[in-house]
Image: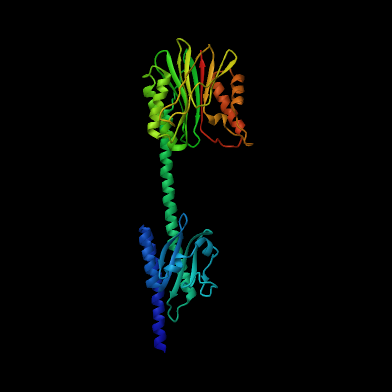
Amino acid sequence: MIQADITELNHLISVKQGRVDSLLELTKAVNSNFSRGALMKLFEFILVDRFKVGKFALFVNESGWKTEINIGNTEVADTINVEEDLLKFGVIQDVRKYPTDLFKGFDFIIPVVSKKIHLAYLLVGEIRLGRLESIDQNLKFLETIASFIIVSLENKRLFQTQLEQERIGKELELASQVQNMLIPSKLPKNESMDVAAYYKPYAGIGGDYYDVISVDENTTAFCVCDVSGKGLSGGMLMANFQAQLRSLVNKYDSLEQLVDFLNYKMFEITGGDRYITMFLAIYDSSSRQLKYVSAGHNPTILIQNGELYKLDEGCTIIGAFESLPQISSGQIFIEQNAIAMCYTDGLTELENELGEQYGFDQLCEFVFKHIERDVDDIMDTLKTEMDTFRGAKEFNDDVCILLNRFF
């Protein structure tokens, strides 16, 4: 009898040592950056060899619940709905006398919870115990092993997610820097015109765009555009459009032909899935003639001799159709000291804390009120007014403004 007890005690010591060794093996595997699959295979081995578990299933929450391991009781495990059947359990449960057959074949449910978040559920059955072994101690050790491996995998996933976010952040920062390089840093300030501009992307990279291009000694082209969509994809399409415009602006006899070909090139790239609204104008300082096309864009405000003109002649949006059904251009004589404001809808649709929009009428009133001031002063005042109007509410779109004074 004494010899049998000694044998059993030695067996118990060996079992406990084996389970401590299991934790050390898992620790080494995690520190050695074993793959998820390798860690799960090691976990399976520990459950079978060290804990003598005959049936077990592991459900893991990773962007939704899924069955990670399912050994020995497949049919029953496949019928379990984690959200309906398991989430109510926050501590180890003995389900051997559960009133239904929902967990038939399993004896215990072991939740894995970290920071009040349910990460996994381990269901076990047919655990073979030695005479001196305690089921409670076994379950606690199983909980420790399961928690260690699941929390380690979760921390690894969160770390990789953080690294990916940092990588994307750096790429977006670089893309934002490249985009800023594409936007003109030097604007005309000469005997013909004085230009000021403002550009605030909604999220680091924007789909709005402005440009001022010197075509020849007397001719200047300028535009403001708004690409559908925000972020990186909008910024990339904007950069492509800028390259097309700059390469083509002096190669066509008419503004209509230029706009038609820009539409063709954009449709070729996007297949009609994305589009651009645009105000494009060409100003000849020798004749003081301004020719323009407004392609589905907000009307540019022109004020001269105390009168306000809405420059809205043009066509539909660019890039949505393979060919534009109709293109018309506007033309107007520019009086001395006239001022023109081109903008995107991020300005007029700017909202305050009450959900009210800044609006076209308020913008017109603003330009009239400050008409005599220098364009840089007007722009600074408008930026202040935008901030005052929106209050604590964030910008909800890219904002792009181009302000021209004609001498």
Write down the quadrant of residue 151 in the picture: bottom left
The residue at the point 47 percent across, 21 percent down is 293
Write down the quadrant of residue 390 in the picture: top right
How many discs mark residues in the rendered view? 0
**x, y percent for residue 328:** 47, 20
**x, y percent for residue 405:** 52, 17
Residue ranking furthest to the top: 286
**x, y percent for residue 136:** 49, 74
Answer yes or no: is residue 372 visible: no
Q: Nearer the viewer, residue 96 or 150?
A: 96
Vertical order, 257 against 232 (above or below):
above
The residue at the point 40 percent across, 86 percent down is 4
- Which quadrant of the rendered structure holds the N terminus? bottom left
Answer yes or no: is residue 91 visible: yes
The residue at the point 40 percent across, 22 percent down is 258
Q: Is 279 on the left or on the right of 249, as rendered?
A: right
Q: Nearer the viewer, residue 206 or 267?
A: 267
**x, y percent for residue 263:** 41, 27
